[in-house]
């Protein structure tokens, strides 16, 4: 006889049926009631043991964390708290768990503590819910693009280029770091390295994605990316997943429309397909917020917040308009911002982004047309404006509680302008001829963006630290497991 998943048993009406459950013990009370979880749902099934007819040897081994097999009859529950339970006729231990050593106790643990045992935190309700939602979002991303005929293109993880030109790369080498080969001038000789040149982990699949878009039209990548930025915040990871679509013949407005549609689609999908998980996470957040002062609590609960994003148009504002709003804002006037906005050209810090999204507009905001100097080299340049300002066709999507969720742009399709810009910011073109070829042979207007997948999961689950929405977080000074 096959065992049945707890998720299905909890919905079943087949009382009197003989069933087998396999899973891990969450609690064992009064030598009688086992709460078993098999990961198929956040909820446990209760098995009632006939302790008088069960060997002591077995009862002793029913401990938190142990893997068990329970055979019995599905019955309507006598007790409160559950609709069905299993009246056990036979209990066996598949894998023991020493209760003295098992780190998870049947009580609430802090998220910080659970991060230290990331291999076991999967067995908690919170992380079951978080990673089910993450799974649903990942599936929805692929579904969204598949329904629109985008080609899923796998871009490389090891590359020779810095797609963002920000120099935040992890090097990849097999050279002996204690004794690397040197050139005559004394520099490390990467010709001797595995790939015959210096390589790094990718910071973005965009550049390779652009090549594919120039042949397939619409493509996307969805894979791991790496940034060696020393940002120890609740929003940054050194290894994170990014969704990057790239579309030929798309201008900035088309790009914004697609990004807004994608975010609404995947959040709706999670709401529809993970109702129990999101309900659980909503209550978790309410509980967490109880310890905060009233002013810091959210006005909307998690489900209301998700629906709000789905039901409302994102606000579209230019950088210039945003700077105007920020300059006139109370926290700027009263010098409450850490970085005061003195005028046009300033890079926006997260405090500014949060003000715009959470205080001023109170909804997701798409900021466009940033100063050229604070954005990447590949962005399409706008004509110089009346005040002599240079801007680019950039777009960042800012979310409440998250800040930047999406970064994207229309791309500079003009070869000369692109080469000039690369020269200005010091990106050598020799290594990038393959990229520049897209502008030499049949160049077209095109656009794309990158969604930080963990920031999307963070928003959808209402968790507050990005380390808690990726199975094994990598952050400065931390690469456990
Ligand atoms: O704004 P970014 O750097 O844009 C790019 O990489 C472009 N090449 C994307 C494109 O146009 N195809 O990164 C995109 C998004 C950010 O908006 C943010 O959500 C996320 O990636 N992100 C991070 N997420 C977690 N940890 C980090 N260290 C992140 N850095 C960026
Ligand atoms: Mg960005």
Image (cartoon, rainbow, N blue to C red):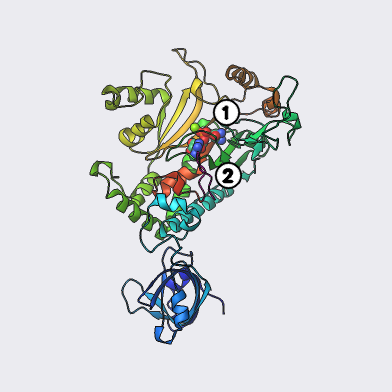
Where residue 46 appears, as percent x and y from the top left, is 40, 74
Where residue 307 appears, as percent x and y from the top left, is 37, 49
Q: Is residue 257 visible?
A: no
Residue pictured at 32% horizontal, 77% vertical: 79
Of residues 371 and 81, the one nearer the viewer is: 81
| 121 in relation to 343, above or below | below
Residue pictured at 55% horizontal, 24% vertical: 380
Of residues 163 and 313, the one nearer the viewer is: 163
The circle on residue 222 is 2
Residue 366: name its quadrant.
Answer: top left
Q: Which residues are drawn in magenta? A: 472-481
| 11 in relation to 414, above or below | below
Q: Earlier in the sequence, mark 2 or mark 1?
A: 1
**Secondary-structure class at tag 1:** loop
Residue that badge 1 annotates: 167
Residue pictured at 49% horizontal, 23% vertical: 374
**Secondary-structure class at tag 2:** strand
């Amino acid at each position: 006889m096959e065992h049945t998943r707890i998720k299905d048993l909890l919905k079943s009406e087949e009382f009197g049926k003989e069933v087998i459950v396999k899973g891990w013990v969450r609690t064992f009370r009064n030598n009688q009631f086992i709460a078993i979880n098999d990961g198929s749902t956040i909820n446990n099934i209760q098995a009632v043991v006939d302790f008088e007819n069960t060997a002591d040897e077995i009862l002793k081994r029913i401990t938190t964390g142990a893997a068990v097999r329970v055979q019995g009859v599905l019955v309507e529950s006598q007790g409160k708290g559950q609709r069905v339970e299993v009246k056990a006729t036979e209990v066996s231990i598949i894998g023991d768990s020493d209760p003295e050593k098992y780190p998870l106790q049947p009580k609430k643990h802090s998220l910080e503590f659970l991060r230290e045992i990331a291999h076991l935190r999967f067995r908690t309700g919170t992380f079951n819910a978080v990673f089910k939602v993450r799974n649903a979002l990942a599936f929805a991303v692929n579904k969204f693009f598949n329904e629109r005929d985008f080609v899923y293109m796998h871009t490389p993880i090891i590359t020779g280029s810095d797609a963002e030109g920000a120099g935040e790369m992890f090097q990849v080498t097999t050279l002996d770091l204690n004794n690397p080969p040197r050139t005559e001038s004394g520099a490390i000789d990467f010709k001797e390295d595995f790939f015959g040149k210096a390589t790094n982990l990718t910071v973005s699949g965009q550049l390779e994605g652009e090549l594919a878009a120039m042949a397939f039209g619409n493509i996307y990548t969805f894979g791991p990316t790496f940034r060696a930025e020393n940002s120890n915040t609740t929003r940054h990871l050194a290894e994170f997943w990014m969704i990057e679509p790239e579309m030929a013949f798309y201008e900035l407005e088309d790009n914004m429309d697609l990004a807004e549609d994608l975010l609404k689609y995947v959040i709706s999908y999670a709401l529809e397909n993970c109702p129990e998980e999101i309900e659980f996470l909503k209550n978790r957040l309410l509980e967490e917020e109880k310890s905060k002062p009233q002013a810091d609590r959210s006005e909307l609960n998690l489900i209301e917040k998700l629906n709000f994003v789905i039901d409302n148009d994102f606000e579209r504002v230019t950088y210039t308009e945003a700077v105007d709003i920020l300059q006139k804002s109370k926290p700027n006037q009263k010098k409450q911002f850490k970085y005061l906005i003195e005028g046009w050209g300033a890079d926006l810090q997260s405090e500014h982004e949060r003000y715009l999204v959470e205080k001023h507009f109170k909804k997701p905001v798409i900021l466009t047309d940033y100063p050229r100097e604070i954005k990447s080299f590949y962005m399409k340049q706008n004509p110089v404006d009346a005040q002599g300002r240079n801007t680019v066709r950039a777009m960042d999507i800012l979310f409440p509680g998250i800040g930047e969720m999406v970064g994207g742009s229309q791309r500079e399709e003009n070869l000369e302008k692109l080469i000039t810009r690369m020269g200005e910011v010091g990106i050598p073109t020799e290594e990038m001829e393959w990229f520049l070829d897209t502008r030499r042979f049949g160049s077209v207007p095109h656009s794309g963006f990158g969604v930080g997948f963990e920031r999307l999961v963070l928003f959808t689950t209402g968790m507050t630290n990005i380390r808690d929405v990726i199975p094994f977080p990598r952050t400065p000074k931390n690469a456990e497991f």
